[in-house]
Amino acid sequence: MNAIYRRERFSVLKNLIELMSPEELVWQEQGLMALNAAAGVGNIQVAKLLVEKAPFLPDIKNPDDSLPIHVAASFGYREMTSYLMKVTKDDEEAKPFEDKSRVRLFVLVTAAKFFDNL
């Protein structure tokens, strides 16, 4: 995950992801998994590799109850937020688009001015 934050070359990250199991990609360092790191720096290429390898990653919450989509929106990454909107499942466990999670996402995308052209 540190390699994502350091913005290592894509080929290096791709090789690391290929070597890891889907379960290893869930491992959380300081409460954040690899997909959250990719979302936090807006690295869509890496996010796509991670989700391709482990499609359940967008639905895993951080200890603070945030999802990767919240992380992307909080940093104002429109393209990443849009991608995560497509791959995040609206399931019973994570409930990304219900209750507090929905409100939080709305506040984040509004603060990031995602609707500035409306």
Image (cartoon, rainbow, N blue to C red):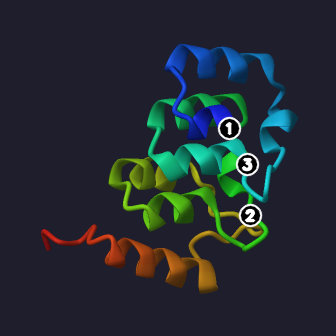
Sequence-first tag of 2 and 1: 1
- Cα separation, mark 2 vs mark 1, equals 17 Å
Sequence-first tag of 1 and 3: 1
Label 1: state its secondary structure: helix
Q: Which mark is residue 33?
A: 3
Q: Residue at coordinates 84% horizontally, 26% vertically from top-left?
A: 21
Q: Position of residue 31 (x, y in %)?
A: 78, 59
Q: Position of residue 116 (x, y in %)?
A: 17, 72
107 on left or right of 57: left
What's under tag 2, amino acid-wise? Asn
Front-lying residue, 8 or 43: 8
Label 2: state its secondary structure: loop
User: Circle 2 sits on which residue?
Assistant: 62
For the residue carrying disc 2, how many other residues have a C-alpha within 10 Å: few (<14), some (14-19), or many (20+)? some
- The nearer-to-camera label among 2 and 1 is 1
For the residue carrying disc 3, how many other residues have a C-alpha within 10 Å: few (<14), some (14-19), or many (20+)? many
- The nearer-to-camera label among 1 and 3 is 1
Q: Position of residue 67 (x, y in %)?
A: 64, 63
